[in-house]
Image (cartoon, helix red, strand yellow):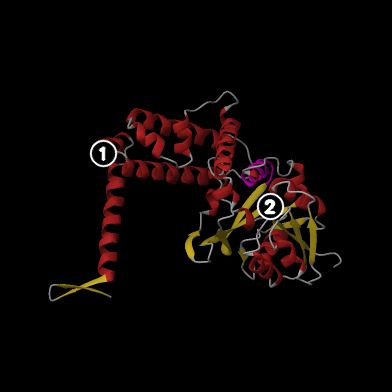
Amino acid sequence: MSNPKLTVLMPVYNAASYLHEAIDSILQQTFRDFEFLIIDDGSTDQSIAIVQSYKDPRIRFVRNETNVGIAATLNRGIELASCELIARMDADDISYPDRLQKQYDYMMHDSACALLSTWCRVVTAAGKHVRLERYTSRFFYYNLTFECWIYHPTVMFRKAAVKEVGMYSMPYSEDYDLFWKLAQKFRIANLGEILLDYRLSPTSLNTVLRKKEYDVANRKNVLRNLRHYMGNDFSIPEEYLECLRHHTVPIATLNDIPKIVDCLAILEQITEQISKTPNVNRNENDIAEAAWFKRDFIVYQLFQELPWPNNLWLLVKTRKLNHITRKTSYALRWRIKKIKHYFSFSNNKVILI
């Protein structure tokens, strides 16, 4: 087709089990003026035959001669894309019918935005609901320092901006690395609507097949991010770093309240530097609020993981005693209410309703 307005870029590698659903979800979009660039990265299953069974003229099918990995495949797709706007898609996910239209409209309205993500629904391999990912959009910039809230197949980005920051440059955690680089030079945004089903498939690289490699790369990215604000000589104990990534078990296992307090003090220092550092995405009020929620979440997690009485001592040291008491009381009342919802008591018998 000639002069499409948008490129949809989808890498494929041994995705035959879900490929029909993924392709159909793009071809059935309400926004229709796009090219669908599908790049096979050396599949050995029926993926190639499935793609070739489609006759839609919007599909451009390209095959890598050998398996080169997702980062190299995506970079090839960016170079081949006919359009300035590129929407990412994965071969095992499902885009909702109005996803492209809503993202396209936003990007056309806000020419300064280089990256736009959306909320999503996480589903099992069989498509059953697991959870909704509805993070507060105002907090994306702050939290990108410590973790990646952005789901890769939900994004739409500008080709020129991605090329300016060096495109995908890591074999693992390539999306987190790219999003961070974009956020340092351009405005990023999140559309607060669920517009994609994100599948937890057994062939997922980041959660199954290469989980260890992705986790190592994620830690490397977080340390890089922290040094951006704190200086190149900044170092931090491994259990502190994991705590800031919301993996609180390592530091809880130490059962050392002074170290936990020290970790939270370092978090405050990092937050102060993030708030001071010029950036097009910086909003001091949003940063302060996001930091408060982050600290609150960490303390609450540790409260549940630490043994008595150190969990109570943690609340005293972090001045969270009243707050956590209220939260725990609320959680208890919620559980009792839920139990009453499922059970009724009649004539001293418990009846399931």
Rendered residue at 37%/32% (across/down): 260
In the displayed structure, 194 sits above or below 177; it is below
Q: Are marks 1 and 2 in contact (CB under 8 Å)?
A: no
- The residue pinned by badge 1 equals 312
> Taken as a whole, is the magenta stretch helix, strand or loop?
helix
In the displayed structure, 257 sits above or below 8; it is above
- Give the spatial CA distance, label 1 vs label 2: 45 Å
Residue 127: image x %, image y %? 53, 66
Q: Is residue 212 left or right of residue 53?
A: left
In the displayed structure, 170 sits above or below 237; it is below
**Label ID, residue 237:** none
In the displayed structure, 47 sits above or below 183; it is below
Does residue 178 belong to the magenta stretch?
yes
The image quadrant of residue 14 is bottom right
Identity, as a three-letter code, of the amino acid under mark 1: Leu
Rendered residue at 70%/60% (across/down): 109
- The residue pinned by badge 2 equals 113
Residue 75: image x %, image y %? 75, 48
The image quadrant of residue 331 is bottom left
Residue 346: image x %, image y %? 16, 76
Q: Secondary structure at mark 1?
A: helix
Between disc 1 and disc 2, the foreground one is 1
Does residue 42 belong to the magenta stretch?
no
Q: Secondary structure at mark 2?
A: strand
Q: Is residue 26 left or right of residue 52?
A: left
Residue 31: image x %, image y %? 71, 70
| Front residue of 106 and 349 | 349
Q: Give the residues drawn in magenta, as a range.
A: 175-186
Residue 280 visible in the snapshot: no
Q: Quadrant of the N terminus?
A: bottom right
